[in-house]
Image: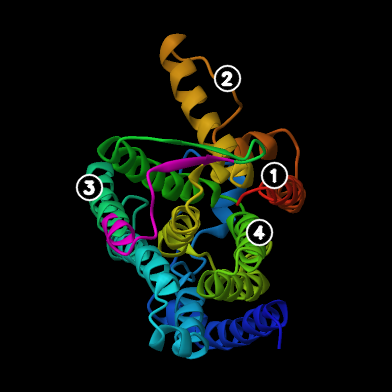
Amino acid sequence: MNELTTMVITAAVCFAATLVIGKFLIPELRKLKAGQSIREDGPTWHAAKEGTPTMGGIMFIIGTGVVILALGWEEMLRGSLAHLYVYLLALSFGLIGFVDDYRKVKQHQNEGLTAKQKFVLQLAAAVVFLCVLRYEGMLTNQIYVPFFNVSFSMPWLAYLIFAAFVTVGTVNAVNLTDGVDGLATSVTFVVMVFFAATAILWHMTTLSLFSAALAGGLAAFFAYNHHPAKVFMGDTGSLFLGGAVAALAFAMDMPLILIPVGIVYIAETLSDIIQVGYFKATHGKRFFKMAPLHHHLELSGWSEQKIVCAFSGLTLVCCILAYLGIQGRV
């Protein structure tokens, strides 16, 4: 059985497992009254989503974990633990998101952990992960530049600071993208397919296993999360996904690949930064109708389905270009 076939089977198994978990999880979330509180300053029609169960990301977190442990057991016995490190980092971010979600649900408001609390916890998780990668010899201080196939080195301390902030930035960018039914799910599905294909190309078996499993889990979650969503992933899911995206980029030792494959995450984040900066500089004027970008497009007349298709399509094109751009890496 070749590696591509193995990855397809892995994705299919995780798809089925996550689908089944969702059948049991969503009713339990409803019983717990784990309903999402909607931003008061968001689009007015989002008020209809009030009470939709959140923390649904638990289903693909569990599904992915079970599958990579079951199907990656032999590799783990051989000492290949890269997929486990990636999963544990993503899980640590997911746990931070879970605490945030739980506090929101418990207090029935749209604020959980403070920004400072989240930042400190996320930074700590990123530093521990990067230190583990360095200890295991999986991380170098070489910055690989896709498309040009050149690398340059950085002092280790500078690199670790850079890597920690890129990780935290990526996690929060993915979190910011989760504002329209199915958006973060579909965009990150495409990114996971890219990482799976890249891991196969470079014979990183356990990383391709993780990427394929999460892709399958996200495909199953989309069945519940597409418009109109039956469940939201919550910060539990979006922070897990952000952690997975960042962890894979560093585990494959190519953080700059996040620029093309994460183009949507970057655009969403920049739109928020531009909006805040412009608002302060002009004493109350807005650059966008609403930030982040997906809300601006909603207020411009785009449907949620159109936004999901457009952003996923853009991600797909950029991921294909990124895949072509790493072909010359040795």
CB within 8 Å, label 2 to label 4:
no
Is residue 311 in view? yes
CB within 8 Å, label 1 to label 2:
no
Q: Give the label on residue 194, or none.
A: 4
Judging by the rendered image, the residue that carries numbered circle 1 is 325
Position of 71 relative to 136 (above/below): below
Q: Earlier in the sequence, mark 3 or mark 1?
A: 3
SS for callout 2: loop
The residues tagged by marks 4 and 1 sit, at their Cα atoms, a distance apart of 12 Å
> Which dot, 3 or 1, sits closer to the camera?
1
Q: Give the label on residue 120, or none.
A: 3
Q: Amino acid at mark 2?
A: Phe
Residue 111 versus residue 77: which sits nearer the camera?
A: 77
Start-end of magenta stretch: 131-145
Q: Residue at x 64, y 35 (%)?
A: 148
Q: Amino acid at mark 4?
A: Phe
Judging by the rendered image, the residue that carries numbered circle 2 is 287
The answer to which image quadrant residue 193 occupies is bottom right
The residues tagged by marks 3 and 1 sit, at their Cα atoms, a distance apart of 35 Å
Position of 92 relative to 148 (above/below): below
Near mark 3 (Cα within 10 A), the count class, few <14, some 14-19 or many ≥20, is: few
Specify whether 204 is left or right of 198.
left
Q: Earlier in the sequence, mark 4 or mark 3?
A: 3
